[in-house]
Amino acid sequence: MERVKKWMLIGLISLMAVLAACGQEIEDPLNWEIESFDYMNQNEEMVSLDDLKGKVWMADFVFTSCETVCPPMTYNMTKLNEALVEEGVEDVQFVSFSVDPTVDTPDKIQAFMADYDLAKADWQFLTGYSQEEIEAFAQQNFKALVRKPSEGTQVDHATWFYLVDQDGKIIKAYQGFQDVPIEDIVNDIKILQNS
């Protein structure tokens, strides 16, 4: 009898958590529209905004030869994916836009991805556009800085993670380099998936 009561209590708590997520809305959504795009991924396949429609996705801007923020950002995105798996949250797409597309060939991207468990998730790492195109795309759609100086190998870029809804709208931006609010992101993804 005690075992039955325990399982009933666990079931009730689980149901309350699901219902609570259903009634919630994301606070102060950005609602920034993303313009249509069609870029090449690490497998030399084209990925468009239309391909991502219907999915909740997380986006960031990184590059494979980054010596500073990109490895920790990618590690943090990996930790986010682990938290989603632990919570039983599925069907989340990860999208990284290369900010150094002339260097980031599919081969280099695949080698970079191999160092992260995130590679086992649904992760598209996009390239195949010009430097000018990604700088304009990041600024116009994500309000994000991307700038490659004329000298050196490093690229200046934003360190945010962006939550994009099923319609291709940017809903939230979160710090992706340090103090990443993983619990908040997981909760916001649940809200979007249940809306």
Image (tube, grey):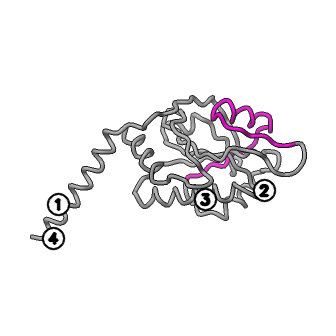
Residue 91 visible? The answer is no
Q: Give the quarter of the figure containing the N terminus.
A: bottom left
Task: Give the amino acid at mark 3.
Answer: Ala
Point out the frontmost of discs 1 and 3: 1
Tag on residue 8? 1
Q: Which image quadrant for residue 133?
A: top right
**N-term-proximal mark, 1 vs 3:** 1
Point out the frontmost of discs 3 and 4: 4
Identify residue for label 4: 3
Q: Give the quarter of the figure containing the C terminus.
A: top left
Magenta segment, which residues? 122-149
Local secondary structure at mark 3:
helix
**N-term-proximal mark, 1 vs 2:** 1
Tag 3: Cα neighbours inside 10 Å, few (<14), some, or many (≥20)?
some
Task: Give the amino acid at mark 4.
Answer: Arg
C-alpha distance separating marks 4 and 1: 9 Å
Identify residue for label 3: 119
Q: In this view, does 109 lie to the left or right of 169?
A: right
Identify residue for label 2: 65
Residue 115 on image: x %, y %: 67, 65
Task: Give the amino acid at mark 2.
Answer: Ser
Q: Residue at x 69, y 51 (%)?
A: 42
C-alpha distance separating marks 3 and 4: 40 Å
Q: How many numbered discs, if any?
A: 4
Q: Which image quadrant for residue 36?
A: top right
Local secondary structure at mark 4:
helix
Tag 4: Cα neighbours inside 10 Å, few (<14), some, or many (≥20)?
few
Residue 5 on image: x %, y %: 13, 65
Q: Report if residue 142 lies within the magenta region.
A: yes
